[in-house]
Amino acid sequence: MQDHCVGVLLRMAPVVHPFFLLPLLVAIASIPGSVNAAASSQQTDALLAWKSSLADPVALSGWTRASPVCTWRGVGCDAAGGGRVTKLRLRGLGLGGGLHTLELDFAAFPALTELDLNGNSFAGDIPAGISQLRSLASLDLGDNGFNGSIPPQIGHLSGLVDLCLYNNNLVGAIPHQLSRLPKIAHFDLGANYLTDQDFAKFSPMPTVTFMSLYDNSINGSFPDFILKSGNITYLDLSQNTLFGLMPDTLPEKLPNLMYLNLSNNEFSGRIPASLRRLTKLQDLLIAANNLTGGVPEFLGSMSQLRILELGDNQLGGAIPPVLGQLQMLQRLKIKNAGLVSTLPPELGNLKNLTFLEISVNHLSGGLPPAFAGMCAMREFGLEMNGLTGEIPSVLFTSWPELISFQVQYNFFTGRIPKEVGMARKLKILYLFSNNLCGSIPAELGDLENLEELDLSNNLLTGPIPRSIGNLKQLTALALFFNDLTGVIPPEIGNMTALQRLDVNTNRLQGELPATISSLRNLQYLSVFNNYMSGTIPPDLGKGIALQHVSFTNNSFSGELPRHICDGFALERFTANHNNFSGTLPPCLKNCTSLYRVRLDGNHFTGDISDAFGIHPSLEYLDISGSKLTGRLSSDWGQCTNLTYLSINGNSISGNLDSTFCTLSSLQFLDLSNNRFNGELPRCWWELQALLFMDVSGNGFSGELPASRSPELPLQSLHLANNSFSVVFPATIRNCRALVTLDMWSNKFFGKIPSWIGTSLPVLRILLLRSNNFSGEIPTELSQLSQLQLLDLASNGLTGFIPTTFANLSSMKQAKTFPTIGTFNWKSAPSRGYDYPFPLDQSRDRFNILWKGHEETFQGTAMLMTGIDLSSNSLYGEIPKELTYLQGLRYLNLSRNDLSGSIPERIGNLNILESLDLSWNELSGVIPTTIANIPCLSVLNLSNNRLWGSIPTGRQLQTFVDPSIYSNNLGLCGFPLRIACRASRLDQRIEDHKELDKFLFYSLVVGIVFGFWLWFGALILLKPLRDFVFHFVDHIERSYANCRRCTH
């Protein structure tokens, strides 16, 4: 324009006065400067407006009007074009914001050829207005947080060569307009949530060389438009849901392929043999599909391969030895491919191989020494196979670049090669879960770069070498599940980078070295299940952030370290089953991140609420069996995630605060054997998740609170040894999942409700001993098909023993542990109350009178079967139906008013160990079958009316105490000093027969005499006759009057 104006003026020069020509030329000369200045101002305004919309744009602090826009960070200009902005490169500056017109005016940048915002925190959708950047050749918005769909208007950017939108949150279909970009070469839309609405609309993309659509939601068969884009050299379609066969035409359609990644899809069938014709292919990654048919031999002929990944398919078969011909191969990964094979020694020819992983297969045989030929090896993994033999020492002398050696979960034997110390660059050494033996080689101390060492779960013996203290880069040391002896060496304090130390389950002795307090990065310390003793270093934890500490099952003594929770990071702390004493560290109360604590089985003293109460993350707490005092303050209501609480066997007292009811996640609660008193809070059954409840051995009184819930998940309820005083609690009827009910030794009264038999269908243990229950035993108890322990002793029960007890099917055979799930203290209880239950009943415990002594059963509780009805007022005969219960281990019917004879088939109870029928009115002879009970070890038949010879033989010969038969005047024989003579015994039998006849005739005579005495008097004595008739008339008139009143 400037040249055109000057030419016109020159042509007009003859007619224009020189006085006017000069100013006009100056004005025209200034036109382009004004235009450029205006454009520059517009760009400056646009960029500053955009900057003001960004969140915390510290990296752009230099963007001010004080300096030209072309000097700003990330801004590039075209000097020849008058300073127009052509490049905007702001990669990885931590910027956040959006790209809408209100934020960035695209129209202000007509010359922009490159926009690079990669690696920031931009969000929102990509505006369609970005298509105004008509000169754009490179658009990189990758690695941000853009969402929404890709605007199809990007397809109007005809000069676009590079398009990178990977690693965002883009959704929807890929616009087919993008396939018509005439110059596009680099096309990367990976790591989004894109779908494939209709690839049929896509055009071939002949200019594309780089194509990446990995990690999206693309479904269907192999996209056809890709097969028509013949210049692709890099193709990544991994992590989608493509299915079907891999295209057999890949070599003809995409002959220039150098990189092919189809991993993590659903391709099926065999690996196509046509792939051998991809002569330029260097990287082949087809892992994690549904491919079958083995590892093909032809792969050994693809000599140009550098990377081969076939794992996570069910290929099966063997490893072809011909793979050893791939001299260029650098990475070989065939993990979890169902391989059934030995390791071909030919793989040792792969001199350029740096990475080998053939883990999680069915490999057998040994580790070939020929693998030493892999002289470039850096990362070696054969974990989770069935490899045997020794680990060749030559590997560690031949692999100078080795940084990772992982052969865990195999069956390697022999010693750890001392040559391992020559692999000086080694960072990871995993030999755990093998059968390695011998001592830990001192040469491990030469691995100065080692970061992780795991030798756990082997058969290692001897001491931990002192040289291990040289490993100053080591962050994790795991030696657990071995047979190590000696002490933890004090040199361990030199391992200043150590974060995890785990030596549990060995035979280590001595004290925890004081130098362990020098490990300033220590987070995980586990020494449980050893023979260690002494005190814990008092400075342990001071100034560091311990997260996991376990001293369990040792003989440590003294106080716990006062600084154990200084870093407020402690999450798991277990010190149970030691000899610790003193008060609990007060810092525990401030450690709000605790979620699992076990301190049971020690001798702690002091107030429990000085260390616990405000722990919102706490899930599991066991401090049972100590000498703690104090009360459970209202602070405990803040433990809202608590699922397991056991503080039994202490001296904690007071009432339970109503805030306790807010522990809505609580599943296991054991407050037994403390000094609690008063009534349970009225809100008690707001503990809707409760499965196990034990408040026995306290001073609770009053009633059991009522529940508004129609069904409670409770499975085990222990109320024993309190002062509850009420009729049988109706709330228990709502506990249809109840397995154990222990109400022993309270003041419950009234009748035992019949609904127990119908409302508690899975009840196994019913203990109501030592209460004030009265009335008859409900026959409905016989409907409890799983009942195996019934103790109703020491009450005021009357009536007959129900013959329907024969229906107690669970007592008909010996018990084994029930097949039930393990109690999961993290999981919420099922609201469907499906059976079997998640609570492990083998953890349950209860007391019974066993062989004359009160015994606590735990662990084997579910193996016990028995009935105890002693110390009541039951009468009648012992039902023969009880002899059908052949699973009984004890039977106690003593101290009642039972009569008749002992059932003849008592010998059918062949696993019975204890039988007590004493203090009744039993008569007759002792059945000889009682001698057939092989396990019987306790027997008491004293204080009855038994007679005859005591049976002999087998188990009865072991009973030498005559008191078990005492006060039965008619018994004779061993172990009594009364010998049985045949004549005397016959006479005794005849005497009983005569006595029976006498009693029979006397009864008949008495009835006849009484009948005639009564009727004779009625006939002969008129006053008596008149009185009787008047009485009958009075009764009749009264009855008639009552009928008239009712009508």
Image (spheres, rainbow, N blue to C red):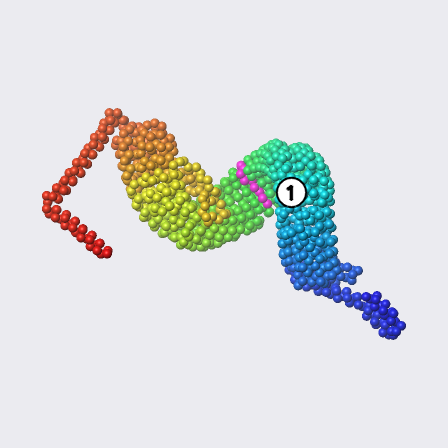
Label 1 sits on a secondary structure element that is: strand
Quadrant in which residue 837 is drawn? top left
Count of numbered badges drawn on the protein: 1
Image position of 180 with respect to 346: above or below: below
The kind of residue tagged 1 is Leu
* Vertical order, 327 against 129 (above or below): above
**Residue at image point 38% right, 49% down:** 733
Q: Position of residue 269 (x, y in %)?
A: 63, 40
Instruction: Please say whether residue 144 is visible from this viewpoint.
Output: yes
Q: The N terminus is located in which quarter?
A: bottom right
Residue at point 15%, 38% (across, down)? 1009
Tell me where residue 79 appears, x and y as whole percent.
78, 60
Region of the chain picked out in magenta, as a range: 499-511
Could you tell me which residue is drawn at 24 percent across and 55 percent down?
A: 1046
Residue nearer the viewer, 561 or 725:
725
Q: Residue furthest right?
A: 14
